[in-house]
Image (cartoon, grey):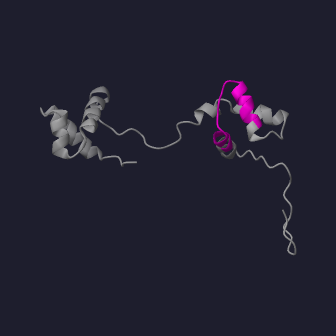
Amino acid sequence: MARTLSQDLRDRVIAAIDAGLSCRAAADRFGVSASSAIRWRQRALEHGEAVAKPRGGDRHSGRIEAHGGFIRELLAEQGDMTLVEVQARLIERGAPVGIGTLHRFFVRHGITRKKRPGTQSSKTVPTS
């Protein structure tokens, strides 16, 4: 992913456009793409300045977080459900999610799915 360009550069491009240059001419002068200059100009007109939008972060977990209570209820009722069974119940409810999405939900909330207790390591023979 490309890096965010500096605020100083954005301000200089907007100032050149305000001084009479077209967006494409200002983009050529400062070595940025025409589409960036156009977007920065639109953002400056709408918000007063062309500040970069926040980058990164999780934008998709809200879909499964909306069903977090339902998932916890399922696990409270039947604690030994597999991820596939939880996925099937969510699909029945109208929330199609992938196995990886469910796994990340469990990791995020510290929910473990181990079905048997761990055994202490043996010094003489391998344990399973």
Residue depicted at 73% across the width and 31% down the height: 88
Give the percent coordinates (x, y) of residue 12: 20, 42
Give the percent coordinates (x, y) of residue 76: 82, 35
Report the residue that reaches farthest toward the bottom. Answer: 124
Label the magenta part by its dominant secondary structure.
helix
Q: Does the magenta portion include 95? A: yes
Q: How many marks?
A: 0
Q: Is residue 28 above or below residue 90?
A: below
Nearer the observer, 44 or 64: 64
Residue depicted at 29% across the width and 44% down the height: 7
Q: Does the magenta portion include 23? A: no
Give the percent coordinates (x, y) of residue 4: 35, 46
The reply to whether residue 49 is in sight is no
Give the percent coordinates (x, y) of residue 36: 28, 38
Residue range (magenta): 85-103
Report the residue that reaches farthest toward the left. Answer: 20
The part of the image, by quadrant, that contains residue 102 is: top right
Q: Name the image quarter holding the C terminus.
A: bottom right
The part of the image, by quadrant, that contains residue 69 is: top right
Nearer the observer, 49 or 95: 95
The reply to whether residue 23 is in sight is yes
The part of the image, by quadrant, that contains residue 41 is: top left
**On the picture, is 89 further left or further right than 49?**
right
Residue depicted at 27% across the width and 27% down the height: 45
**On the picture, is 91 further left or further right than 25?**
right
**On the picture, is 74 further left or further right than 43?**
right
